[in-house]
Image: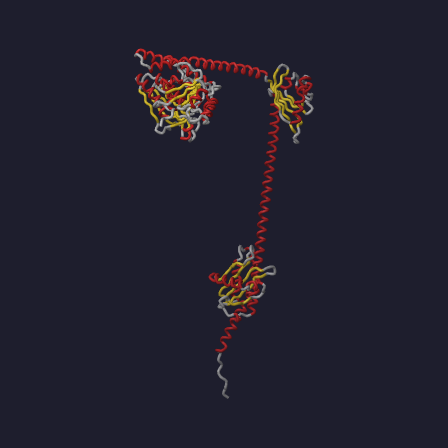
Amino acid sequence: MKDSMAPFNPDPYEDRIRCLDEERRRALTALELAGSMGTFASALNHLESPDPILYETIRKVRALIRFKTAAIYLVNEQDADFYLAACSPSDGRQYIENEVDALIATFMFSWSLGRSKPLIVPDSAQRETLVIHSLTTPSRVRGMFVGVLDESKTSILDSYLSLLTVILTGAAQALESYELYGRIAEMNRRLERQVEDRSRELSETSSRLARERIRSEAADRALEEKSDTIRAFFETSQDGMVIIDRRGVVLEINNRAASMFDHEMKEVLGQPLRDLLSDDFFEERKDRYLGIMRRGEPVRTEESLMGKRFELSLSPLKDGRGEVVRVACLIRDVTEDRELSDALTTARDEARAASKAKTEFLANMSHELRTPINGIMGMTQLLLAAELQEDQQECCRDIMFSAGRVLRIVNDLLDLSSLENGRMALNEVSFSTRRVFDFICKTFAEEARRKGLEFHCEFAPDLAEDLVGDPDRLRQLLINIVHNAVTFTRTGRVDVWVGEAPELLDAPCPESCAAFAFTVSDTGPGIPEQHRQTIFDSFTLAEEFITKRSGGSGLGLAISRQLAERMNGVITVESEEGRGSVFKVAVPLPRSTPEVGAKLASVHAPCTPQCGRVLTVEKGASNNGSPARLLRGSGLAVEKATDCSDALKRIGDGGCELVVLSVPLIGGGGLELTRTIRGGEINGVDRNLPVLMLAEDVSEDEMRRCLNAGVNAVISGPLDAEAFVRTVQGMIPPRR
């Protein structure tokens, strides 16, 4: 019978066969993965990071279930936040982060942390399917797995999801083991470091103890040597040394101290100190000794004993608690020293008295000589201003020349006396450097021309135009040196340079000051080397070879040096015998400013005489060289007052443009009159009326008193008629 059944068609079963094959393959893979869950453990203690665990977990998961992207988040131990630790492939990282943010926002992420099974949810765009599963151990949550399926969720068997849980649980345990191994390794390293540190400390301690032992032995030897040295010093000292206790018993004494008491050292040791001294001597000084024990302060004194003088130094010796237990006494025989000191003191006092007598004699004689000389020169100047015959004028000029030489010597003596006894005061006025020194150079240029010498004067272009100082003393400095150069130079030339030379000064010059300097060089005989250090001493040239040929008092350079030092300056000389000399002078002077110029009198070289009315106050002045007579001879209108009361009335009458005070500083009333003017107490009189003070010999304190009272300028010492007239002319205000 013919088979009525249709032929067999296998096509409908092929899809079913393929599905069964795929399920079989996955089942085998799942069994393989289940058998290899513990393979992490063998290498966990050698891992430097958790990355191998994470990527091995992702590989196993993707072998079990097809994922487009698989990622693992881990918990940050610092802030308990999740961070993306691994992602495969890496280009899906941004997508995973966005989807996790969305899961967190919908609380799906936190909800899945409490589950022990995978959670399958759609992504935020409803296009992909996500699988999320926590990585949890019994102790804590380690992280979160997030995967994007590459197949339908219906094709995933429950057994696969169970295996996924097994794999991720194993991964969480592997991460926990890794962390534990890390902590163990860190503890091992810490213990190793501690062992190393402790071993090093023990080694260093051992070395230090060895060094300390060596130092201790060395210190013991040094202490022993020091003790021997001190003992040797104590026993051989030329000063007596005694150590006594609180009861006054001698504990230690050297041979020198024992001999001072006329005893042997062994006889003194252990004996009370009072047994070695007379009762009266000891009783008088017992309280002092007890005071040292009480106060603990050293005492130094001098005593006379047995016809000799001793210097005693008593020093308390304290124990560890600071209590005085002994007293050390150093005894020095100073009999010869005191006798020598007394002799030197007596000789010094006698020398000072002799020097003072000499100085006072020079000052008195100079004043006595100067008064008549000033009268002679004043009258001679008045005669020269009159109409005289030629021979009469020649006689007057000879008188002026001779009187001038005598006056210079007298003035030098007076200046030297003032400098030596410290009474010379310096003016502080604003002056023009070029005007003051240009006049001197022109004067000596004419004298040099008459001797057939070349004379050249140069002013440095950077020289400050106006400075503050004593122009009269600076003028005296330059005149002394230029006068010597012109006098002692027979042929050749004399060169004068005026400028600033800070390198000559010993100390730096402040910015507000100028290092005013001048240099005088000549082609004269020069100065032998053995005389260069002594030419600045008083009276040196009076007995030297130059003086024998050219004359001179030998005071000019001595005064010049003291003047330069008085102004905080320096004076030096460079010379070669037979080729000439170079003298250099440098003085620091403040630069003049409008403010300073307004306070100080401006003193200049000769200027055009003013026609102002000058009031002189001359108490009892009647000699022919009086200031009033000298000023009248120069063409000035002068009115003379006999005292300050008379002057006060005449000033109040008006018309006075300058007041010249020639009255004693003490009791003369000049300073009181100046204060009255400056106080504006005279109606109709300008309180800035110029005042000039003439004084015989002014100290620094007296100069300061004058300037503080309001005096514009002070002319101290011998009155130079020509300089006096120039000063007055420069102080009279110009007419408007």
On the image, the x and y values in percent for residue 527 come to 38, 18
207 shown above or below 178: above
Given residues 19 and 409, the one toward you in this image is: 409
| Quarter of the figure with residue 722 | top left
Given residues 700 and 24, the one toward you in this image is: 700
86 shown above or below 532: below
| Quarter of the figure with residue 393 | top left
Q: Total of numbered circles in the picture? A: 0
On the image, the x and y values in percent for residue 240 come to 62, 20
Given residues 479 and 610, the one toward you in this image is: 610
On the image, the x and y values in percent for residue 496 come to 35, 23
519 shown above or below 63: above
User: Is residue 562 visible to the viewer in this orientation of the structure?
Assistant: no
Is the image coloured rainbow, by chain, by secondary structure, or in one colour? secondary structure
User: Is residue 669 visible to the viewer in this orientation of the structure?
Assistant: yes
Residue at horizontal 48%, vertical 80%? 9
Question: In screen coordinates, is 167 left or right of 511?
Answer: right
Question: In screen coordinates, is 113 left or right of 480?
Answer: right
Q: Quadrant of the C terminus?
A: top left
In the rendered image, the residue lying farthest to the bottom is 1
Residue at horizontal 48%, vertical 82%? 7
On the image, the x and y values in percent for residue 523 come to 34, 19
